[in-house]
Image (spheres, rainbow, N blue to C red):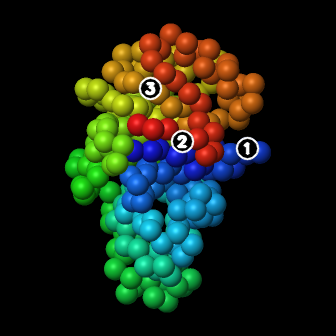
Amino acid sequence: MKLITLGTAHGNPTYCRNCTSTLLQFDHDLYLVDAGGPPLATLTKLRMTPPMNPEYRLRGVFITHAHNDHIGGLPDVLKHCVKYPQKPAVFIPDAAAVEPLCTWVSTMSAAFPKSGIVPQVTHEGNLYRDEHIAVRAIRTAHMDWSYAYEFTYDGGSEGREGRLLITGDLRADLADFPVLTGHYTAIMVETTHYTIKTENLARMREILLHADTEQVIFAHVYDLWHGDGEQTLLDYFAALPYKKSVAHDGDVYSL
Ligand SMILES: [Zn+2]
Ligand SMILES: [Zn+2]
């Protein structure tokens, strides 16, 4: 499985990062975790969208919460799935967002209601399963309806099984950090609500010190951790006994 960071900024795009969107790729089958920034344009630049690359298909979209930097690009993606038929499973945390979303996409594309794409409301627990992945949603407290997602997957043609946790946005005090269970191939954490001057980053380090994982990916990268700040963040987490990296737009992880 490949994880490609399409967008790694926080609530605003920055000089070098678009808003949050992460791609999970199993050969030609694609899954989006969040759809902030311009995910359709980015996927197209990666040559992973029809009509130019019709072998690719979007299988699922998992939105962590309805803040704009995580969902703002979704109408564009869904409209494209109507125009070049694909029928992804779409999960939206906030029930109140589903009808406006469908209205918006229908306004842009009159064929949307007949497309077979039916956004569903995320619920806690086992959420989705197909031949590649099983997805579990874990409620967080970033806003009224927000979730982390845990992906258990086969390895596609690369043949490696694994387990990935994407925390989504969390409370600044990390009281809602998902309970870690067992071994992870990778944990992707957000880094926007933490500074070295507060105790929150120390809490994050404490949690991650006890994580059974092969690597941590610092995403949703706050301005402080851009440029030279990247090394500051990595130095702060130097004690973690596994691989760690700060994600940039377009990074590719083989997991
Ligand atoms: Zn965010
Ligand atoms: Zn948020």
How dense is the environment of label 3, judged by Cα within 10 Å: few (below 14), some, or many (20 and up)?
A: many
Q: Residue at x 37, y 63 (%)?
A: 59
Q: Nearer the viewer, residue 117 or 65?
A: 117
Q: Which residue has dot 2 on it?
A: 252
- Of the numbered discs 3 and 2, the one sitting upstream in the chain is 3
Of circles 2 and 1, the one toward us is 2
Q: Name the residue under label 1.
A: 16
Q: Which residue is tagged 3?
A: 215
**Quadrant, the N terminus:** top left
Q: In the rendered view, does 222 fall on the left or right side of 74?
A: right
Label 2 residue near ligand 1, CB within 8 Å: no
Mark 2: few/some/many CA within 10 Å (<14, 14-19, 20+)? some
Q: Quarter holding the C terminus?
A: top left
Q: What residue type is labelled 3?
A: Gln
Marks 3, 2: nearer the viewer: 2
Disc 1 element: loop
Under circle 3, the secondary element is: strand
Give residue 118's position: percent from left, percent from top: 34, 74
Q: Earlier in the sequence, mark 2 or mark 1?
A: 1
Q: Which residue is drawn at 59% across and 36% down?
A: 247
Q: Where is residue 129 in the image (x, y as percent from the top left)?
A: 24, 55
- Depth order, front residue of 44/207: 44
Some atom of ligand 1 lies within 8 Å of the CB belonging to the residue at label 3: no
Q: Can residue 245 be seen in this view?
A: yes
Name which residue type carries label 2. Val
* Element class at badge 2: strand
Q: In this view, does 20 lie to the left or right of 171?
A: right
Which amino acid, mark 1? Answer: Cys
Q: Residue at x 55, y 21 (%)?
A: 201
